[in-house]
Image: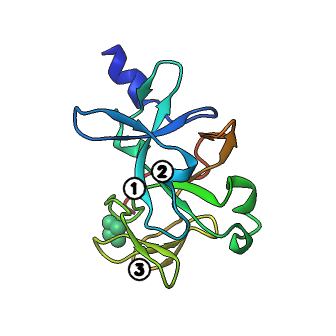
């Protein structure tokens, strides 16, 4: 129906981010919720006008993580807000959640088959079977609100079989 459609559109500039637990309350994410070098949190884009999370499509699931802004690559720097970066949480190998964090190496890890991605450098796939980078979402913080500065950069989801 229309509400499913509204919840399935891809993220765009101005969207905020939310954690949704089942049918429970929607919790909007504030910049302070994301701690430096802590494990990524899995979130959904949130439409602030319609006041709905965009969780109608699994491909909209994102991860947020905060890194030291000085270690971000030149590609990543302009996409970050106070060191916070956002990526698709859908592993490009077979679509598992990229849910684990390797704090020492500062790499995102997909627990299914061990693919590793570098959040400091455009979500580049650096180890394991993942064939390409995670798509990223540029961020901004205005009036203390964390929001997308644009839509996905790069392809979301798994690579087509060849
Ligand atoms: Fe992530 Fe295979 S689905 S490594």
Q: Quadrant of ligand 1?
A: bottom left
Alpha carbon separation for disc pair 2 and 1: 7 Å
Packing grade of label 1 (10 A; few <14, some 14-19, many >=20) is many
**Residue 156 numbered tag:** 2
Residue 126 visible: yes
The residue wearing badge 1 is: 90
Specify the quadrant that holds the C terminus. bottom left
Image spot of residue 86 (x, y percent): 55, 54
Image quadrant assignment for residue 1? top left
Does residue 161 sit above or below 11 in this rendering? below
The residue wearing badge 3 is: 128
Q: Residue at point 40% right, 75% down?
A: 115
Q: Which of the marked residues, 2 or 1, is nearer the chain's N terminus?
A: 1
Q: Is residue 112 left or right of residue 7?
A: left
Q: Residue at point 43% right, 67% down?
A: 39
| Dots 2, 1 in contact, CB < 8 A | yes
Image spot of residue 62 (x, y percent): 45, 50
- Does the Cβ of the disc 3 residue fall within 8 Å of ligand 1? yes
**Along the viewing direction, whichever of 139 and 30 lies nearer the viewer:** 30
Q: Secondary structure at mark 1?
A: loop
Q: Which of the marked residues, 1 or 3, is nearer the chain's N terminus?
A: 1
Image spot of residue 35 (x, y percent): 52, 62
């Amino acid at each position: 129906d229309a509400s499913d459609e509204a919840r399935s559109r891809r993220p765009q500039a101005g969207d905020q981010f939310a954690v949704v637990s089942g049918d429970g309350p929607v919790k909007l994410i504030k910049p302070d919720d994301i701690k430096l070098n802590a494990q990524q949190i899995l979130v959904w884009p949130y439409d602030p006008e319609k006041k709905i999370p965009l969780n109608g499509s699994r491909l909209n699931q994102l991860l947020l993580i905060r890194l030291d802004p000085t270690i971000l690559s030149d590609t990543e720097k302009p996409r970050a807000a106070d060191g916070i970066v956002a990526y698709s949480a859908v592993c490009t190998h077979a679509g598992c959640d990229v849910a684990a964090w390797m704090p020492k190496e500062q790499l995102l890890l997909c627990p299914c088959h061990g693919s590793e991605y570098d959040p400091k450098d455009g979500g580049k796939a650096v180890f394991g079977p993942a064939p390409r980078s995670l798509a990223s979402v540029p961020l901004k913080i205005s009036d203390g609100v964390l929001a997308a500065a644009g839509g996905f950069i790069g392809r979301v989801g798994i690579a087509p079989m060849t």
